[in-house]
Amino acid sequence: MPLTKEKTAAIFTEFGGKATNTGSIEGQIAQLTERISQISGHLQQNKKDFSTHRGLMQLVGKRKRLLNYMQKHNLTGYRQLIEKLGLRK
């Protein structure tokens, strides 16, 4: 299930500054994290949904690449984002 427009706007407002700033790396990472948590919940109920599992792995890889980019270019922002989202890195 995709994120609603209101939820997406709230995520980008909190992490990207304003709702129309959809290109911010922080907002994109936060949005991917929200989608990953939704899909993880779906997969706990539907263990044999292998196509969704593949999509989940693609989202995790995309988030990892964005986090690596942010770590190289903005280390303090990276550390704050990891703390705010509760990721393990």
Image (cartoon, grey):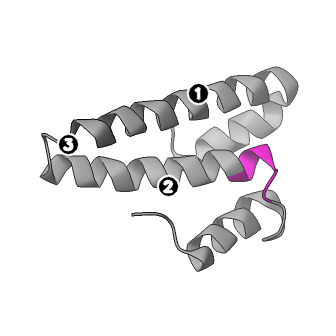
- Is residue 84 in view from this perspective? no
Q: Mark 2 vs mark 3: give the one in front.
A: 3
Which label is found at residue 34? 2
Mark 2 crowd level (few <14, some 14–19, many ≥20, 10 Å Cα): some
- Sequence order check: which comes first, mark 1 or mark 3? 3
Picture coordinates of residue 81, whole percent (x, y): 68, 44
* Percent of width and height locating residue 3: 51, 66
Dot 1 amino acid type: Lys
Q: Where does the magenta region start and end? A: 22-27
Q: Tag 2: residue type?
A: Glu
12 in relation to 54, above or below: below
Indicate which disc residue 49 carries. 3
Helix, strand or loop under label 2:
helix
Closest to the camera, between mark 1 and mark 3, is 3
State the mark number for residue 64.
1
Q: Secondary structure at mark 1?
A: helix
Measured along the vertical axis of the image, is residue 50 above or below residue 24? Answer: above
For marks 2 and 3 on the same chain, the one whose residue lies earlier in the sequence: 2
Q: Quadrant of the rendered structure where residue 1 is?
A: bottom left
Callout 3 amino acid: Asp
Quote the CA–CA distance across marks 1 and 2.
Answer: 14 Å
